Image (cartoon, rainbow, N blue to C red):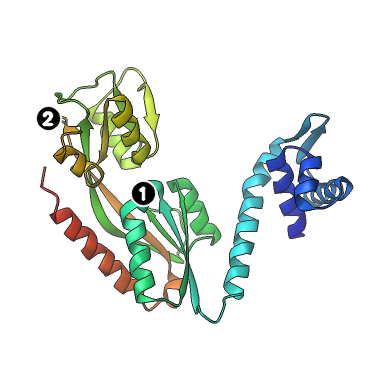
Amino acid sequence: MNLVMVKTFLEVMDAGNFNKAATRLHVTQSTVTMRINALEELLGQQLMIRSKSGAELTSAGFKFKRYAQTLVQVWDQARQEVELTKNFQSTCNIGCHFDLWDGAGQEWFHFIKKLSPTTALSSWCSDHTELNRWLNSGMIDISIAFDTQLDINSSYETQPLFTDKIVKVSTTDIEDGMDAYYIYIDHGNNFRREHAIDYPMDETTAITMGNSQWGLNYILRNGGSAYLPYRMVSDLITENRLFLVRNAKQYSHTCYVSYNLHAVKNWPWFEASIKCLQTQLLESYQQIVSV
């Protein structure tokens, strides 16, 4: 399969029509049409429906979309690694859950660069499902996430990194209960199960968010309550901008690191960087007053 055809498919999908895609690619519209036709013939499926208003993906087109994105991403990374300048000896691609970049992700980057200045680093943030897919496809070498990557193959290993404390906070001093201003933050599979047991709800929560920082920003601006990592709200509690909800249950949230065993063999700094990160996180937690 010609990678140019795949890139053209993604460009048409992003632009919404063949004319704009041709302009972006600096080719003629007929060239774009020829490439898409060739791709569809190769796959044996129609990927796009053409009309005067633009181009829309068919069902087959939607299915091919994520594979096309992965193909291009993996190719770009492969080219980057092969074309390493003399200043770098290796590369490391790290995937990090959205909620873990501020803190664990950034700290680990710091330690890796300190321990191995000749390693070229890249970072990608996403949710658990996407991180798992990236691991399996080889797009990333390491994943930092709250849910273990159980469906990855034997080329990978997973180990606990640290344990988060998830507490219920509110912009007002209140007793625990499902108030109308409660914002549900999705902290992963384990949290969902425990939360469903402790807070059985007959109705769907008015607002649900998949990112702790979004939830924190929302309640600080609009008021309300939510379950958030204590490391994220400890200073706000000290400043009385947030209050621990009285008698609310607390949850433990373990962060895991999953990594490619073959890649680790080329990283003498790997184990040392993990130990540095765990020590740093432990010291940070010890500075927080126990709740």
The residue carrying mark 1 is 147
Q: Residue at horizontal 37%, vertical 70%?
A: 112
Q: Is residue 274 above or below residue 267?
A: above
Per the rendering, the mark at residue 247 is 2
- Could you say whether the residue bearing mark 1 is in a helix, strand or loop? loop
Taking 172 as reference, is 267 left or right? right
| Residue 78, percent from left and from top | 60, 68
Taking 9 as reference, is 117 left or right? left
Outermost residue to the bottom: 86
Taking 73 as reference, is 276 left or right? left
Split into 4 quadrants, where in the image is the N terminus?
bottom right
- Could you say whether the residue bearing mark 2 is in a helix, strand or loop? loop
Nearest the viewer among 162 and 79 is 79
Q: Amino acid at mark 1?
A: Asp
Taking 273 as reference, is 137 left or right? right
| Residue 89, percent from left and from top | 50, 79
Q: Is residue 40 above or below residue 206?
A: below
Task: Locate residue 270: give its quadrant.
Answer: bottom left
| Residue 264, percent from left and from top | 42, 73
Q: Residue at horizontal 66%, vertical 45%?
A: 65
Is residue 46 at least partly visible in the picture? no
Looking at the image, is mark 1 or mark 2 nearer the viewer? 2
Q: Residue at horizontal 83%, vertical 51%?
A: 35
